[in-house]
Amino acid sequence: MANGNLTSEEQSVLKRIEDENVKFLRLQFTDITGTVKNVAIPASQAEKAFDEGIWFDGSSIEGFVRIQESDMRLEPDPTTFEVLPWRSDGDVASARLICDVAHTDGTPFAGGPRQVLKSVLEKADEMGYTASIGPEPEFFLFETDENGNATTIPHDKGGYFDLAPKDLASDVRRDIIFALEDMGFEIEASHHEVAEGQHEINFKYDDALDAADNIATFRSVVRAVAAQNDLHATFMPKPIAEINGSGMHSHISLFDEDGNAFADDDDEFNLSELAYKFMGGILNHAEAFAAVTNPTVNSYKRLVPGYEAPVYVAWSDTNRSALVRVPDAAGTSARFEIRNPDPSCNPYLALAAIIGAGLHGIENDADPGEPVREDIYEFDDEKREEYGITTLPPNLERAADALEADEVITEALGEHVTEKFLQAKRADYADYKTHVSSWETDRYLEKF
């Protein structure tokens, strides 16, 4: 079955397909919004997929190409091969491969989200660094109705770190963890989050490209296992008013040939000068990359004071009202946590924007300023101005405007993605502005 034109990694995948009796392959990629797309092929076509790619209509994928240039191809990454634990039936299995998107001549498609992240990581590599990310995506589990449709009724009444019987979803989380481990994830912790029906499963940090792949896979696994339990899993940032929303806090550090380039045990916060410059870049461009890390109208219902979500562009080691938090970690574990991203984002574009901002900070000796150890939620406008603290955009429209005006983030995303992304986000917000919500009718219909 092996072909001399294939790499050793590709030949290894062919052997696993044969050994594990894989009959179908799902070739996966994401559109510009982060939605996972896939095409299923018989496993017998795996060699052809590696050798020639699989062609598809790019004009049908949001944010890709126009109809007159629609032919594109998927190029499977053999390092991403995993058997799907919920798609195995006895001795017959299905597996997935994450793909890069290319033009028909084999050149990388600049508008492919995975390629966007690769391009930013190439810049980091040229500077001598690799980026390591530890994401913490949160999600809700809701009941479904008699027709299998999603509701907003939480599956349990648990709270932060609660146990059964309050946390009725502990068995579901266990099944999710088993499925993730079967797909190569190293799970570090899982627990019930603050809100009813809300959960978090933390997996081990990884290099940025693998981390983005893992986030996309994680969302697919959570949804699949939830559906098997007649539940609906959602990564919507704020599905229920007046309770905590779901974030995707992301821990980040850079490594060079000597180890963790963010580490300095002589510093009060165990961070190096390089780490502070990177952090300065994050703070300088946060208002622009918010459009990418918080890409939905609903995202900004989460980013309000009072629900443990960051609103203010500042950093701290002691409180969670700041955008960046420095945990008590040193040596190899030295890092900081970016708290505004939410799990509705396209992970490839979000990490590309964040890392692009940080690298620009290094190049320009950005200064993050002093840490803010007070509760910024309690500051008035005058005190925030005194501290030089700005805020994240209040809505998607303002975030899109900030993105368009920021050359650093638009360069990280590339011209194609920036244009298509802004078109999509502005269309979302325009549609939202014309929508009349139940809140408005409840409040005004009889009053006026």
Image: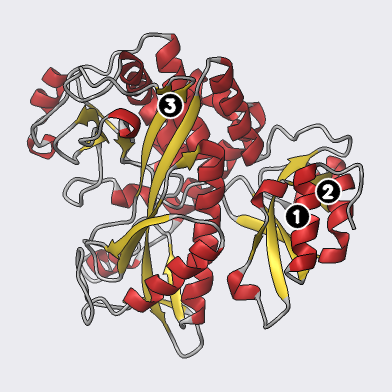
Looking at numbered disc 3 in the image, what kind of residue is underneath it? Leu
**Label 2 vs 3, first from the N-terminus:** 2
Residue, disc 1: 13
Q: Position of residue 313 (x, y in %)?
A: 26, 29
Side of 370 relative to 24 (left or right): left
**Label 1 vs 3, first from the N-terminus:** 1
Q: Position of residue 401 (x, y in %)?
A: 45, 30
Compare residues 95 and 142 and report the one nearer the observer. Answer: 95
Disc 1 is placed on an element classified as helix
Compare residues 366 and 79 and report the one nearer the observer. Answer: 79
Mark 1 in CB contact with mark 2 (< 8 angstroms)? yes
Picture residue at 76% right of the left edge, 72% below the top: 21
- Vertical comparison of 233 with 125: above or below: below
Marker disc for residue 50: 2
- Vertical comparison of 304 with 393: above or below: below
**Label 1 vs 2, first from the N-terminus:** 1
Marker disc for residue 62: none
Specify few, some or many for label 1: CA neighbours under 10 Å numbering under 14, 14-19, or 20 or more.
Answer: many
Residue, disc 3: 254
Disc 3 is placed on an element classified as strand
Q: CA distance from mark 1 to mark 3?
A: 31 Å
Does residue 297 show up?
yes
Q: Quadrant of the N terminus?
A: bottom right
Q: From the image, state whether disc 1 or disc 2 is nearer to you.
A: 1
